[in-house]
């Protein structure tokens, strides 16, 4: 796979872990098999789901559709970088103006 896609959720409380794992399961069940879930991490006020893909825009569209179908009220970001790269490009939200980082 050429790209690492990250779905990043803001975490208000450490008790959010179970609900975030449920969201990860919904993403796993809704994306095309061309994209591979590579795990997650939890900490520093964020929960990240890592996805290997050759088509980050396509994967992002599938993820957004799955999350929107769930009536998601939680804030999230989607960004990607080349597997061998360091700089992330934010796909969602489209008006994100800060630097994307994984803490």
Image (cartoon, rainbow, N blue to C red):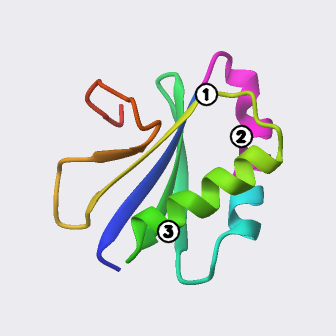
x, y percent for residue 4: 36, 62
Q: Which residue is mark 3?
A: 58
Q: Is residue 33 above or below residue 59?
A: below
User: Which of the labelled discs sits on residue 75, or is there none?
Assistant: 1
Q: Quadrant of residue 99?
A: top left
* Residue located farthest toward the right when viewing the structure as drawn: 70
User: Which of the labelled discs sits on residue 52, or is there none?
Assistant: none
Q: Quadrant of the C terminus?
A: top left
Residue under the point 82% across and 38% down: 71
Which residue occupies the foreground of this view, 102 or 78?
78
Q: Is residue 97 left or right of residue 35?
A: left
Number of other residues with Cα within 10 Å of mark 1, as a class: few under 14, some 14 to 19, many 20 or more: few
Q: Which residue is mark 2?
A: 20
Residue under the point 64% across and 16% down: 12
Indicate whether residue 20 is drawn in magenta. yes
Q: Which of the two discs, 2 and 1, labels the residue nearer the N terminus?
A: 2
Q: In 3D space, how far apart are the residues under numbered discs 1 and 3 (Cα atoms)? A: 20 Å
Asked if the residue under mark 3 is in contact with the one under mark 2, i.e. CB atoms within 8 Å, the reply is no
Magenta part of the protein: which range? 11-24
Q: Is residue 19 left or right of residue 2?
A: right
Q: In 3D space, how far apart are the residues under numbered discs 2 and 3 (Cα atoms)? A: 22 Å
Q: Quadrant of the N terminus?
A: bottom left
Q: Is residue 2 left or right of residue 87?
A: right
x, y percent for residue 97: 30, 25
Residue under the point 68% across and 17% down: 13
Which mark lies nearer to you, 2 or 1? 1
Instruction: Assign a secondary structure to mark 3.
Output: helix
Q: Is residue 51 left or right of residue 31?
A: left
Number of other residues with Cα within 10 Å of mark 3, as a class: few under 14, some 14 to 19, many 20 or more: few
x, y percent for residue 79: 38, 48
Residue under the point 62% across and 63% down: 62
């Amino acid at each position: 796979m050429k790209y690492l896609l990250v779905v990043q959720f803001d975490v208000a409380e450490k008790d959010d872990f179970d609900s975030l794992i449920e969201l990860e399961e919904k993403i796993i069940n809704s994306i095309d098999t061309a994209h591979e879930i590579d795990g997650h991490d939890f900490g520093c006020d964020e929960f990240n789901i890592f996805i290997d893909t050759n088509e980050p825009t396509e994967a992002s569209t599938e993820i957004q559709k799955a999350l929107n179908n769930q009536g998601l009220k939680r804030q999230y970001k989607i960004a990607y970088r080349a597997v061998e790269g360091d700089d992330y490009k934010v796909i969602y939200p489209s008006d994100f103006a800060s630097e994307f980082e994984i803490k």
